[in-house]
């Protein structure tokens, strides 16, 4: 099959002015729960079972068509890194970025639907607190938190981009020039995906990880999240969902790189496995151990990551007040 040269979007315009929502499925080609949920929602709108009355909603059932055809995460590379427009596209995702970035800019709110490799419960990825820093300045945290707590899942993860950027700095400082040339991710801008791009253009955005790739409940989680978003934003006349108050909020605070092909985990870790301070997570090629710095959780462990790239993330319970609920009340 030839390489795709376009993406398909479906837009509904309500007759009353309101927010402009963008819903993405299959940004990673093997994460299809969002695609199935979008098809179901569009069928409901088309049949009249669900009424879109206000604002605008655009659905992109298959955001990375090359990766989707190949039933793999990426086409030429990960679409959810280094997302920007480019004058001279070097690969498929560069070309796709030139179509996707203007689409993001034409909307106010992004719901990006993903799934993950290892089993576990769904979680939402929340952006930063309001801030005027250089990395990810933001002023819409209140609105973003309100949406995150109404999507359905109770688990929320925050602090991704600044941890990623600190990891990049550490990585660049530690590596020799030849190692650096082999690394994919020495530029902090490499951490910019769909949600970061949306925030950089004045919108707000949530990534929802709906469950394991093949989990039968993942498309249902994605479907409910779309309905809850339409209701919360007032686009459809559905009962507005209440924000969850039983949240589990984790803050990603450290990224640990794999440095050598012989660096190995001591256990087949899954995301959100609990760690006690001092627990041995893995052993380095030189025999030294990598241990948990404090009580916390392991996130996104990748036993096969390329040396010079992230091996796993370490997270703790967050002290952030989310949607008006202080950490002490969770
Ligand atoms: Zn994904």
Image: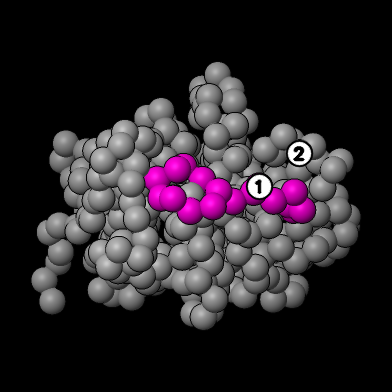
State the mark number for residue 75.
Answer: none
What residue do we see at 40% from left, 68% from top?
A: 37
The reply to whether dot 2 and dot 1 touch (C-beta < 8 Å) is yes
What residue do we see at 59% from left, 26% from top?
A: 130
Q: Secondary structure at mark 2?
A: loop
> What separation in Å lies between label 2 and label 1 (alpha carbons)?
10 Å
119 left or right of 140 in image: right
Q: Which residue is under mark 2? A: 325
Residue 129 position within the rendered picture, expressed as x and y whole percent measured from the top left: 62, 30
What residue do we see at 20% from left, 59% from top?
A: 8
Q: Which residue is under mark 1? A: 243
The answer to whether residue 164 is visible is no
303 left or right of 76 in image: right
Foreground pick, 111 / 252: 111
Relative height, residue 267 to residue 330 (above, below)? below
Q: Is mark 2 within 8 Å of ligand 1?
A: no
């Amino acid at each position: 099959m030839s390489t795709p040269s376009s993406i398909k979007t479906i837009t509904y315009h309500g007759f009353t002015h309101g927010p402009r929502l963008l819903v993405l499925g299959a940004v990673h080609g093997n994460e299809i729960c969002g695609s199935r949920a979008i098809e179901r929602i569009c069928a409901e709108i088309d049949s009249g079972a669900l009424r879109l009355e206000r604002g605008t909603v655009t659905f992109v059932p298959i955001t990375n068509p090359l990766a989707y055809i190949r039933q793999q995460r990426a086409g030429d590379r990960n679409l959810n890194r280094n997302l920007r427009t480019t004058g001279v596209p070097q690969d498929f995702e560069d070309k796709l970025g030139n179509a996707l970035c203007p689409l993001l800019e034409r909307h106010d709110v992004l719901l990006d639907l993903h799934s993950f490799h290892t089993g576990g419960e769904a979680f939402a990825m929340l952006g930063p607190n309001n801030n005027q820093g250089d990395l990810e300045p933001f002023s819409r945290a209140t609105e973003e938190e309100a949406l995150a707590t109404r999507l359905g899942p109770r688990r929320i993860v925050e602090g991704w981009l600044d941890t990623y950027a600190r990891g990049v700095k550490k990585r660049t400082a530690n590596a020799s020039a030849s190692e650096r040339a082999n690394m994919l991710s020495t530029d902090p801008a490499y951490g910019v995906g769909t949600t970061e791009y949306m925030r950089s253009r004045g919108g707000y955005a949530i990534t929802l990880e709906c469950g394991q790739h093949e989990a039968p409940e993942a498309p249902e989680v994605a479907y409910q999240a779309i309905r809850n978003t339409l209701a919360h934003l007032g686009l459809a006349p559905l009962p507005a969902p209440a924000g969850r108050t039983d949240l589990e909020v984790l803050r990603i605070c450290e990224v640990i790189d794999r440095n050598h092909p012989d660096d190995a985990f001591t256990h087949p870790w899954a995301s959100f496995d609990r760690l006690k301070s001092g627990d041995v997570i893995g052993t380095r090629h030189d025999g030294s151990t990598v241990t948990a710095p404090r009580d916390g959780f392991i996130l996104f462990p990748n036993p096969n990551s390329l040396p010079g790239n992230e091996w796993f993330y370490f997270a703790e319970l967050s002290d952030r007040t989310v949607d008006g609920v202080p950490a002490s009340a969770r």
